[in-house]
Image: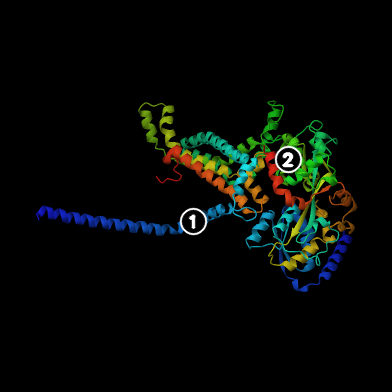
Amino acid sequence: MSAPALMQETAGAGQDLNAQALRTDARRESLRLLALLSPSLFLVFAIIIVPIGWLFWLSLFDEAGAFSAANYARFFEQVSYIKTFTTTFKVAFIVTGACVLLGYPLAYMLSQLPRRAASICLIFVILPFWTSVLVRTYAWLVILQRKGLINSWLIDLGVISQPLSLANNLSGVVIGMTHILLPFLVLPLYASMKTIDTDCLRAGMNLGAGPVATFRQIFFPLSLPGLASGVVIVFVLCLGFFVTPALMGGGKVIMWAMRMEQTTSLYSNWGAGAALGVVLLVVTLALLGLFQWLLGARATGVWSSR
Amino acid sequence: MNRTRSVSVVAVAALMASFAAPAMAGDTITVASWGGTYQEAQTKAFFKPTADALGITIKEDTTNGLDDVRLQVTGNAVKWDITELGADECARGSKEGLFEKLDYGIIDKSGINPKLVHDDWVGISYTSVVLIYRTDVFGDKGPKTWADFWNVEKFPGRRALSGSQSTETLSVAALAEGVPIDKVYPVDIDGALKSVDKIRGHVDAWWTSGAQAMQLVKDGEVDMASIWNGRAGTLKKEGAPVSFSFDQGVLTADCMVIPKGAKNKEAAMKALAMFVSPQLQANLPLYVDNGPVNEKAFETGKIPQDRIKDINSAPENVKKQVLQDAEFWRDNLVEATEKFNNLIQQ
C-alpha cells in the first residue's frame, strides 16, 4: 500500500468518525430541546387538541345519541344557517377592509411622527382598548340610532329631513366592529413600520425616487408583513364576534357566534352547536391557508419563524 | 303596612310549624334565577322570608337557562338546589330527565294552574308579552290589538318583535290573524308563520333580550313593539311616553325545578313549598311586575287593591290573555323555531 493512499484512508475514517459524532450530538441536542418543549407541547395538546377533538366527536351524534350526520345536514336543510354563514363572512370582509383603509394611514402617520407625539397618539389608539366592548357598543348605539347624536345634528343642520338608518342594521354592525377591531390592525402594523430601516428610504430618494415612488416601491412592500398579520388577526376575530352584532344588528344581522348560542339552547344535544364550531374552524383554517398561499409565507409572518 | 307585615309573620310561622323539621336548620341551599331587578325582588319576596322561617341559609346564583342545568346534570357537577327556568324549558328538561321529582305532600299545589303543576316542575311566576306603543307618536289612538300592529296602513311606524322568543312571536302572529284567545293553542304553526311573513318586511328590529326591547322603545328607535310587561311597566314608571294593556297579552310562566342530583334535596323541597305558598307569592308583586303563580295570593289581603289591576296574573287580567302551553312547545319548539328563523332571516 502506498503512503498517500494510507493517509487518504485514515483521513476518510477520521471524517466519518467526526460526522458521526456531530450527528449524535445534533440528535442529542434536538432531544434535549424536545424535552424542554414537552411541558408546553403537553399543554397545547391538553387544552387545544383534546377539546377540539372532543368537539368534533360530539358533533357526530344526534339528539337520540346515535351516530349521525344530522347536525351537518341541518346546514343544507335550513336556509337560515347558510344565510348566517354568508352574513358572517360578508361582515368579516367588510370590517377587515374598513380597518385596513382606516388603520393603514393611521399607522403610517404614527410611524412618521416624532417619538413623543407618536406615543401620545398611540395612547388614543390603545385607550378604547381598555374599555369594555359592551360599553363601547352601547355608546355607538347612542350615537347612531334614529334619535341619536348624528341624526339629531344632521337634522338640526338641515342636511337631512329623515333620520338615516345607521343602527339596528348592517351599517351599525360594521361601524361598531370596525371601531373595536381597529387597534388589532394598527398595533402590529405600527410595530412593523417602526422596524423599516429609514436608510432604505433615504437611499431611494438619493437615487432619484420621488416621495410617491419611495412609498410605493420601498415602504409599502416592507410594511406588508405587518399588514398581513393585522388583517389575519382582525379577520379571525370578526368571525367569532358576538356582542356587537347582537346589539347593533337589530336581530337582522345574525352572525355565526349568535347562531351557535341559539342552536346550543334550542337543541338538547351538544352536537348541534358543536357542528357549527367545527364548520367555522374548518372554513377559517382553509381561508388562512389560502391567505398564506396568496401572500406567501414571508408576508404572513404570524406562523412562520423568520 | 305594619298590619300586613304582622299577618305575614304569623302566616310564615304557621307554615314553618306545619313543616316541623328542626333537623334541617343550618342547612345551606343555592337558588339560581335570572338576576337583575327580578331576582332582587325574589330575594325580598321569597328567599329572605324562607331563609328566616326555616332557619336555613339561601345562597343565590344566576342562570342562563336550561343549558346550564343540562351542563351541570350531565356533567355530574350540580351546584344548585333550586333553579328557575321558562315553562317551556321545564317541559323540555323534564322530557330529558334533568330534574328531581317534586313531593306534593310537602308542596301545596292548590291555587296553581294545573297546567303548571307537574311531577318534576312547578310554576313560580308569570310574565306577559304585551303590545306597547309610543303615545308621542300615536296619542291614545295607538294600536291596541295585534291585528292593529299588523295593519301597516292604518298604523304606519317602526316596529319591533322578538326574534329570539319564537314561541311568543308565533303566538301574537296567530292573534293578529284573528284567532280568538282561547283557540290560539295548539298553535297552527304554518298559519302563524304565514302571518309573520306578512309583517316581517315592516319589522325594523327583532329584539333578542328584554333590555334591548326596552331600549328600542325608550329611545324612539321603534314606535311599537312586543315587550315583556315588566319592562313595559319600568318604561312607564321612568316617564317614557308609552301605553300598553293586558288585552291580547301572552302569559308565559316561569317555573322552578330541583336539578337531578341536587345536594340538599330535602331542604330545597321545603324552600320551594314556601316559594309557591300564597303568603310569599303575594309578596312578589310588591316589588316587581311579574305576577304570582298562585291565585290564592290575591286572597291574602297583602296586595293593595289598586295594585291588583296592574298585575298580569290577577283573575280579571288572566281572562284577557293567552296562556302559553309549555307542553305544546316542548314538542314543537325546534321545528317551529328553525322555520321561524328561516323566515325572518330571508
Residue A236, x across and y down, in percent: 54, 43
Furthest residue toward bottom: B23
How many numbered marks appear? 2
Residue at the (71%, 34%) spot, across then down: A146
Three-letter amino acid code at disc 2? Answer: Leu
**Which residue corresponds to mark 2?**
B216
Which numbered circle lies on residue A45? Answer: 1
Q: Splitting the image into 4 quarters, where does residue A153 fall?
A: top right
Three-letter amino acid code at disc 1? Answer: Phe
Residue at the (74%, 34%) spot, across then down: B202
The answer for how far apart the CA atoms under marks 1 and 2 are is 46 Å
On the question of residue B242 being in view, the answer is: no
Q: Which element type, helix, strand or loop, lies under badge 2?
A: helix
Q: Chain of mark 1?
A: A
Q: Residues within 10 Å of mark 1 (few under 14, many from 20)?
A: few
The answer to whether residue A297 is left or right of residue B163 is left
Between B55 and B193, the one lying in front of the other is B193
Between B298 and B121, the one lying in front of the other is B121
The answer to whether residue B305 is left or right of residue A193 is right
Q: Residues within 10 Å of mark 2 (few under 14, many from 20)?
A: many
Q: Quadrant of the N terminus of chain B?
A: bottom right
Q: Are dots 1 and 2 in contact, CB under 8 Å?
A: no
Asked if both marks, 1 and 2, belong to the same chain, the answer given is no
The answer to whether residue B6 is left or right of residue A64 is right
Q: Which element type, helix, strand or loop, lies under badge 1?
A: helix
Residue at the (72%, 63%) spot, across then down: B100
- Up/down of B244 relative to A201, above or below: below
Residue A215, x across and y down, in percent: 43, 30
- Up/down of A55 relative to A112, above or below: below
Residue A32, x across and y down, in percent: 37, 59
